[in-house]
Image: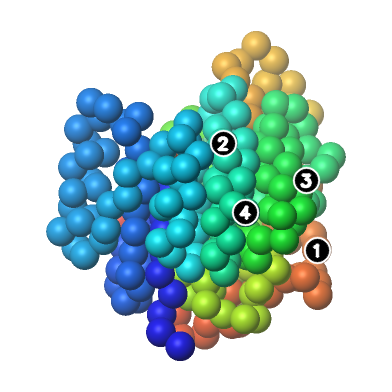
Amino acid sequence: MGKSKVLVVGGTGYLGRRIVKASLEEGHETYVLQRPEIGLDIDKLQMLFSFKRQGARLVLASFSDHQSLVDAVKKVDVVICAMSGVHFRSHNLLMQLKLVEAIKDAGNVKRLLPSEFGMDPSRMGHALEPGRVSFDEKMRVRQAIEEANIPFTYVSANCFAGYFAGNLSQMGTLLPPTDNVTIYGDGNVKAVFVDEDDVATYTIKTIDDPRTLNKTLYIRPPDNILSQRELTHKWEKLLERELDKSSLSEHDLLASMEGLDYATQVGIGHFYHIYYEGCLTNFEIGEDGEEASELYPEVNYTRMDEYLRIYL
Ligand code: NDP
Ligand code: GNU
């Protein structure tokens, strides 16, 4: 059996561009969806051309043209969608229902990886508004996939290091604090941090793997299961200096949500579930899941002390 042909949807996005790169590096015939809607976005267009120079094939298709999507997915065995999730009230993720329709009509796709790549939405039924919207949408997409009997893998990638580790999980910044770090509660709840390039590597590893067919792939590499205090300590060792710490109570974090903009409210809800509730680590991976670093021990995933060096 040769390597599967892959179509990446959302290929110019933050995660999508890494998935395109990983797919090419792994030697898959790689197709990237080129949406006419990008219009004058010259950065996106140039990125698509750079993919082409690296060996990818661009496929023109629009979410408002069903047949174009059918034709696009007919070219490949595997579809990976990395469409944007939260941030805006735009319900982007539900656009994936059109992709599901196209895959259903085309009938040839052996695996679909919808845009998930975060917390496991099936465990977030109780999540706070407005952050829960993306989980609800991801669950609606799952339902459509499963009703259409499309083979799938859901990737639960936990915390992207760029959003959660580089800043020691401080909200509203992507850089580490220099003096004072806000610690959520006692700071001992375990989270999981993953370098975005590793998310892409594991994602590509799994597309031809029968062990993850119709399952969730949890990216939970053991050395990267860290509390906020442990993460902070790694940064302090690099800095050769200790930071002042102030604890933020669950109540104060949630109270701060009032009156803030939508994206920040989404963020506060997510941070609450991760750092107070421990939603990334308060369960064991069951029968319907697999852990990525166990399945693919050959991947030398990035440890967070290494990751944090770039911020020095
Ligand atoms: P981006 O915001 O970078 O967007 C990805 C792509 O979505 C865009 O490049 C674009 O594709 C496509 N897109 C946006 N709007 C539309 C639309 N209306 N119709 C069709 N395509 C559209 O996404 P991210 O990489 O940040 O997010 C990808 C996934 O990862 C999401 O599910 C998100 O929830 C998750 N995530 C998880 C994080 C974590 O810490 N675990 C952090 C951030 C995201 P095109 O290339 O065609 O222009
Ligand atoms: C991360 C954010 C960072 C928001 C997930 C506001 C989906 C997930 C871990 O909501 O797009 O400061 O799981 O002030 O399932 C938000 C998104 C990041 C968090 C990024 C996300 C994580 C989405 C902020 C902030 C650093």
Q: Residues within 10 Å of mark 1 (few under 14, many from 20)?
A: few
In the rendered view of the protein, which quadrant contains the N terminus?
A: bottom left
Depth-wise, is mark 2 or mark 3 nearer the camera?
2
User: Which residue shows up at 41% across the image and 52% down it?
Assistant: 72
Q: Front-most of 84 and 140?
A: 140
Q: Label for residue 104?
A: 4
Amino acid beneath label 3: Met
Q: Which residue is mark 1?
A: 283
Q: Is residue 64 above or below residue 80?
A: above
Q: Residue furthest left?
A: 53
Depth-wise, is mark 1 or mark 2 nearer the camera?
2
Depth-wise, is mark 2 or mark 4 nearer the camera?
4
Amino acid beneath label 1: Phe
User: Which residue shows up at 19% across the image and 63% down it?
Assistant: 54
Horizontal side, residue 287 vs residue 103: left or right: right
Quadrant of the rendered structure where residue 309 is?
A: bottom left
* Cα distance between the residues tagged 1 and 3: 12 Å
* Cα distance between the residues tagged 1 and 2: 30 Å
